[in-house]
Amino acid sequence: MKALMFGWEFPPHILGGLGTASYGLIKGMSIQKDLEITFVMPKPHGDEDQSFLKIIGSHNTPVVWRDVSYEYVSERLSKFMDPQKYFDLRNHIYADFSYRKVNDLGCIEFSGRYPDNLLEEINNYSIVAGVIARTEQFDIIHAHDWLTYPAGIHAKNVSGKPLVIHVHATDYDRSRGNVNPDVYGIEKDGMDHADHIMTVSDLTRNTVIEKYHQHPSKVTTVHNAVDPLSPEILAITDKRGVNDKIVTFLGRITMQKGPEYYVEAAIKVLQRTNNVRFVMAGSGDMMNKMIRLAAERNISDRFHFTGFMKGKQVYEIFKSSDVYVMPSVSEPFGISPLEAMQCGVPSIISKQSGCAEILSYAVKVDFWDIDAMADAIYGLITYPALHKFLKEEGLTEVNNIKWEDAGLKVRKIYDSVTG
């Protein structure tokens, strides 16, 4: 079985949870010896771990070859396609690239990020996907999240191979219901064209069925998981440098993540005790608003903003925390609580998160219930027996949530779709 996957980011260079989830799933699937995965992304950096997959960068995939001879094309492409077909294709699409950023090698330029012209890059990515689909050998197409759905559709149309899409989030989650019609249209089009849809939680599955009008039989939940911690991460020690208890929020500081509820809960905790500090690790469009809110409520001396953190930095802050809080308004899954629990940090999560479906040893509250959130924080920093119980049981639980199990579920869907 050969799978052609389309993604947008991949460790060690990640901008959010999509890259982490893609990496974990592919690594978990790599134990299946009869499965080969080719992972396409707009612009890899070149230092990605390719020991268990093949990575193709769209930024160095020629879509227009200028001033080349028939012999040159024949030498390079004859085993994949008739050289004359290449020239016919080139002549057909060349005009479409007059306004695009095409370099001297005939490749479209990509930022490798989430630029202001994101929709243009998504469209360009789909064009390159068609070229790749003509040259690669594969049995199934797997597209991760809305950014790659047009690429998956184009690859399906070119190759005739089945398409499965992986819904890591929807715009209903990111926007609190104030949906961007362009994004919704791309998401809906991807779901309509997919032969099967995978979602990271039942919460997301229900959204796909109800908001995007997909038949329930077409949608399967495959919960996310976590990688075992490396010896390097396990060796990290607590470096807090203070005796105060540390409570941490880590994630994008956007309305989806509910940062204001975390600040409001912190205010209530600080009314009961002063031996606690609150950390907000991350960046986002609500960061300045949260800084002002902490200042207005006179808790700035107990509140710390670290900015964006990744890689080892994430685990350094977990190892120095006593409690982790994820107050998301709508979280399709949420891997960060699992990562915190791996470090022995009891977690408080919103009931409106996908990971709440599989975690029994995390405290669950409604995102809007700041009184319950504050009570949970206060209880965990005040009662050692409660903290110890959730630390030990949570660690045992999360160590049994494995990517290889998720990979087997995906493979079952592959087999079903390909017959």
Image (cartoon, rainbow, N blue to C red):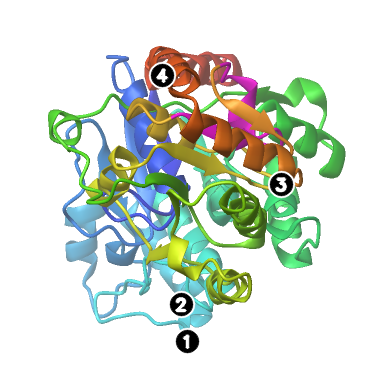
Q: Which residue is mark 1?
A: 98
Q: Residue at x 82, y 28 (%)?
A: 215
Nearest to viewer (mark 4 / mark 2) = 4
Q: Earlier in the sequence, mark 3 or mark 2?
A: 2
Q: Which residue is mark 3?
A: 370
**Magenta segment includes 319:** no
In the image, which disc is placed on residue 94?
2
- Does dot 2 land on a helix, a strand or a loop? helix
Quadrant of residue 68 within the rendered picture: bottom left
Residue 167 versus residue 354 in the image, above or below: below
Could you tell me residue 413's position as x and y percent? 56, 18
Could you tell me residue 6's position as x and y percent? 45, 46
Are the residues tagged 2 and 1 within 8 Å (C-beta)?
Answer: yes
Distance between mark 4 and mark 3 Cα atoms? 23 Å
The residue type indicated by label 1 comes to: Ser
The residue type indicated by label 3 comes to: Ile
Could you tell me residue 386's position as x and y percent? 50, 20
Which stretch is magenta?
A: 346-360
Mark 4 packing: few (<14 Cα in 10 Å), some, or many (20+)?
some
Q: Which residue is mark 4?
A: 388
